[in-house]
Amino acid sequence: MKNIVIVGAGFGGLSVAKTLCRNNSVEVTLIDERNYHLFIPLLYQVAVGALSPDDVSIPIRSVFARYPNVKVLKEAVDSIDLRNRRVITCVRAISYDYLVLACGARHAYFGNDDWEQYAPGLKTLEQALEIRDRILDAFEQAEAAIDDVIKRKYLSFVVVGGGPTGVELSGAIAEMAHSVLRKDFRNIDLQTTKVYLVEAGPRILASFSETSSKQAMRDLQALGVEVRTSLAVTHVDAGGIQALNERIDAGTVIWAAGVRASDLNRFLDGEIDRQGRIAIEPDLSVKNHSDVFVIGDQAYCLDRKTHKPLGGLASVAMQQGALVAHNILAGIKGQSRRQFQYYDRGQAATIGKCRAVVEVGIFKINGFLAWIIWLIIHIWFLMGGVNRIAIILKWFWIYIANYQMDRIILAKEWRFYPALRPIRKYKEDKTPSKE
Ligand SMILES: Cc1cc2nc3c(=O)[nH]c(=O)nc-3n(C[C@H](O)[C@H](O)[C@H](O)COP(=O)(O)OP(=O)(O)OC[C@H]3O[C@@H](n4cnc5c(N)ncnc54)[C@H](O)[C@@H]3O)c2cc1C
């Protein structure tokens, strides 16, 4: 039996494993540093308290419980030894006949890693929960603030990056402030909340058509989001952002711009692009290593039709995963491999509770119908019946009752921006001195 090692149980890795698990002539070892598969496209809903972590994730073991030829390991892979055909995890070395790397990407701050402490990215559940804490706590701090300037700062939110994540997140924050939380606070007027979406390029949703981009901008403005294009962020700190000559003061900054592929690429031979992705062959293998495949956000892959690099999309990773499984089985049977051809099924971004932009081929849809399509696509792709039902019920409740359930702040201490913390300082000033 050939041993196939897959690193990463995201969209790409899971797609490979789900095809191979039905083939008893191979043994699959699926390694991930987490014990769950994360449905990243709905992560922003965790960040705004609309869904909980369990709604958007599923334990990897449960997916393969019925397949004895799949071994699941919760371990982080530290390095790859191509010469001896082994991957080295934090606890052991694992040999492979075929290796599939699908470790995705993480956020990048264009060489300014210190910005991360002030502006978390949205890629993991931990980050989504931290963003949720920050957003909810900002409202609490504004409610408690005595100084109007501080109050205004806490009621200002900046989302950096006008791609689908930035658009979805800024729309959801605006909706939360202006509608969902409106009646919960006594000392602040949430209508004064400012949400800025800052994009360095000339328009938001650059991968969509200009028509959809303009429509998304109008929809965001209708929700109260101030969209600022052609504004490159040059500095981020505890009190906001600096962009060219402009300063935007904000208590909460969220980073939705720039990604960097998995560091494991440095153990492979091949060209690496500016985003850290490794160039792969048309059959998705690594140059000179036909037994090693790289897929998804970790790989730099040209579209065979347009000759442009494919974007970081779940659909790209899933289609690549299916082809890698096919090519591995073809190799074992001595048959020839196929080359990767991406079938573009369109793209979608939602704006608030009932608007979206959807593009499928020449069709461009927006508004409520687009939102329904977005809803169906996401529910369709979600794994596991439990998640689907839980999400449908929650969305239905949010829609009719305008109530978001997951609104607890996990962090006990206000730890994000001590410089902006007025309450503690006020209490300390009032404490009588011991002398
Ligand atoms: C907020 C957000 C919203 C998005 N929305 C959409 C959308 O609406 N539609 C769409 O098509 N795409 C969307 N994307 C992009 C999509 O999520 C990615 O393209 C897709 O997840 C890539 O799949 P992947 O398998 O390459 O990596 P991932 O899905 O990121 O999976 C990587 C896996 O590898 C594991 N891993 C990483 N390093 C190691 C290691 N060293 N050892 C062990 N395990 C490791 C991780 O734990 C993870 O499980 C979105 C992305 C983000 C961040």
Image (spheres, rainbow, N blue to C red):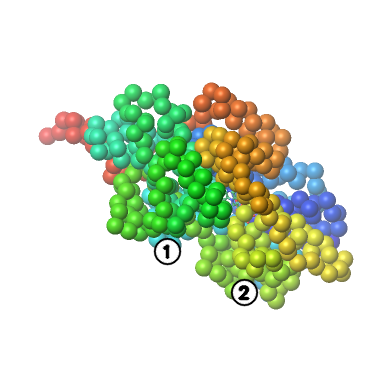
Along the viewing direction, whichever of 356 and 195 lies nearer the viewer: 356
Separation of marks 1 and 2 at Cα, in angstroms: 23 Å
Q: Residue at x 79, y 55 (%)?
A: 20
Left or right: residue 219 compared with residue 303: left
With respect to residue 195, does 115 lie above or below? below
Q: Estimate the x, y position of residue 123 in percent, counting from the top left.
A: 53, 49
Q: Estimate the x, y position of residue 147 in percent, counting from the top left.
A: 23, 34
Is the C-beta of the residue carrying label 1 under 8 Å from the nearest atom of ligand 1? no
Please tell me how crowded label 2 is: few (under 14), some (14-19), or many (20+) other residues with Cα within 10 Å.
some
The residue beneath circle 1 is 111
Q: Estimate the x, y position of residue 373 in percent, counting from the top left.
A: 65, 39
Amino acid type shown at disc 1: Gly
Q: Is residue 38 in sight in this rendering?
A: no
Q: Residue at x 71, y 45 (%)?
A: 61
Q: Is residue 404 in sight in this rendering?
A: yes
Circle 2 sits in a helix, a strand or a loop, which is it?
loop
The residue beneath circle 2 is 270
With respect to residue 399, does 345 lie above or below? below
With respect to residue 343, does 355 lie above or below? above
Quarter placement of the N terminus:
bottom right
Along the viewing direction, whichever of 37 and 258 lies nearer the viewer: 258
Among the two numbered marks 1 and 2 on one chain, the one whose residue lies closer to the N terminus: 1
Amino acid type shown at disc 2: Gly
